[in-house]
Amino acid sequence: MRWFLPFFLLFVFIPFAAAQESPYGVYADILRGFEKPFVPRNLELMRSAGIAWIRWDWYWGTVQSGPEAPIDYDLIESTLDQVERNGLKSLIILGYSVPWATPVCEHHDEWCEYVKSVVSRFHGRVKYWEIWNETNIESFWRSTPDPKAYAAFLKCTYETIKAIDPDAQVVYGGLAGVPFDYYEGSLKAGAGEFFDVINIHPYRSGLVSASLIRQFLGDLQRFQDLTVKYTGKKKPLWITEMGWATPPSAGDRSAALIDAALASLFPEGVPGKVAVLFDPLYPPSNCTGPEVWQGRLKTPVQCEPVLIADLKTLDPAKNPVLILPPSESFPTEAQDEIREYVKNGGTLCALGGIPFYYRMAPAEDGIWIRTESGKSLNNLPLAHSFRVHWGAWWTEDGLPKHPKPVLAPGKEEALKNYAFENIHGQAFFTDQLLKDGDSLEPFLVWAEDPTKIIAGLYRFRSDWKGNILLNTVPDSIGNGNRTAEPFQGIYLSQAMLLAITYGVEVFFPYEFQSVEQSDSDPEHHFGLTHADLTPKTGFLAYKALVKARPAGSEPIPGELFSENGNLCTLSWKRPDGQTAYAIWSPGTKITKNVEISGEVTDAFDCHGEPVKVEKTMTFGQKITYVIGKGLKIQ
């Protein structure tokens, strides 16, 4: 069992003692999901990557068709046989609702009879049982989430399992996000005595700053602190879901609108470079760098990154276009610089949802965060200061909640490749604030009323000289748990390494194989591999991490941050006696002199690509692993 530091010492960053058991797991719906036909190959690839655990669902409704029907275990038996043949350990999720016992919190007797049968059947083969999944979400719990109800449900399940197998380990149902109030509510109701392992799903954006890393580690510590507070015990903490989806069409709709706007504004070609806001201190731009737009835009352009600090001197003559990351967030404290850029002739592309909606401002450490005002009608004046006016169902009576967009007349050719699958608008733009000479060019309009504009280009030709391209169709990339594929492995390796070093005993990324039946649905693109089981960067990063830090590695105490929080360093002693280091910059690249003693035996990045170890090295977001005998790096 791990020991945990008090929360106030967390930021000293002394790693926790490591468990000898492998910390490497993965979630895969191998019983009845998309993965089912590919189980043998899935398991082989997991083993080849060094994965030791698989988390999978045993669906009540799959093995029993009715309250009086016998339980059919053939499918479970055959799948479990394959898991065991590949040497993987199972974490089994017990669930879910069936027609005759919904909501399950009102049917303890029926549920516990099912649990009794399952555990009795697989006693000795399965040791770890997770009790439901994401009970703090109504779609899983099938009732209003209630921590007291879950505590009672957990108690009856725990007692049923332990009566059959006292050595079995009961895992708290993985909580969606970091819902401290829900978890504490269940502990107050007595849940702490009825599980052996804590379990959370702390999805979030990439850990691209010291502030975000501290927040992540602080969240982990707080869950453990709550457990100790209410039970007096230190229990293992697992992350059984966390990952980043890589939907290939994310950003494509925004790119299509930008292409159409560039064709309309610059028929002879863009006279300069396209500026892309790509700032490590501004999280919405995590993975919307110039190379991303260069690959998505069809217009021949050269993209270059700009920092928020660069906006003060951004010259429309050199950079006639500025692309903000597709998002409803806006760097409010840079509004004056962006407004001047537009006034002086620049074209602002602010896409991905209702513009100027979430106010962003820099915190004490310089990282831009949403301000306390969040989203509110108070943001309308900000839009109005850009001469942008929009209305929605919550601002004006009679407007629809989810208007279906279609192409505006005359845009059929310019937007012929625009994808309308599973999208809707949220609001409508108007020309109410424009002056003589200004205009609003529609790109997307409401199918039921073409005068209602869902996406359009504000052209200023009065005292202002620039343009603003806007839409109200969500098309985020790099926000939350979505990213471009090159960044998936970067974010995964950072999160796994930090979590395992600082107290998480087993980490299960979500998920192993992508479904990929819809380009626009993020849920289809969380996998570490593609649907055809070719590796994504997540798989490469997982394999590289296990290679660098084999199971049984012991962390070496030391400070995580240096260079004012801009450089991260972790080290550990491997089972083969060698020392390994992981070094990366969560934000901008850093070049520094490196003092190395000992023999370097291997060095590679987080995707497994070789790295040359030199006296002067540049570190970026990709972790650099250095392994050696008697190794010490300063």
Image: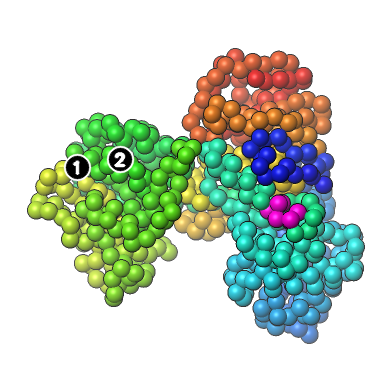
**Which residue type does callout 1 highlight?**
Lys
Q: Which residue is found at the position 54% from the left and 40% from the top?
A: 211
Up/down of 334 relative to 222, above or below: above
Mark 2 or mark 1, which is nearer the start of the sequence? 2
* Tag shown at residue 322: 2
The percent position of residue 587, horizontal first and vertical second, equals 50, 34
The quadrant in which the C terminus is found is top right
The residue under label 1 is 343
Residues in magenta? 223-229
Up/down of 602 relative to 492, above or below: above
- 118 left or right, relative to 136: right
Up/down of 107 relative to 632, above or below: below
Q: Which residue is found at the position 33% from the left and 70% from the top?
A: 393
Residue 128 in view? no
**Which residue type does callout 2 highlight?**
Leu
Residue 465 in view? yes
- 279 left or right, relative to 618: left
In this view, which residue lies farthest toward the bottom? 68
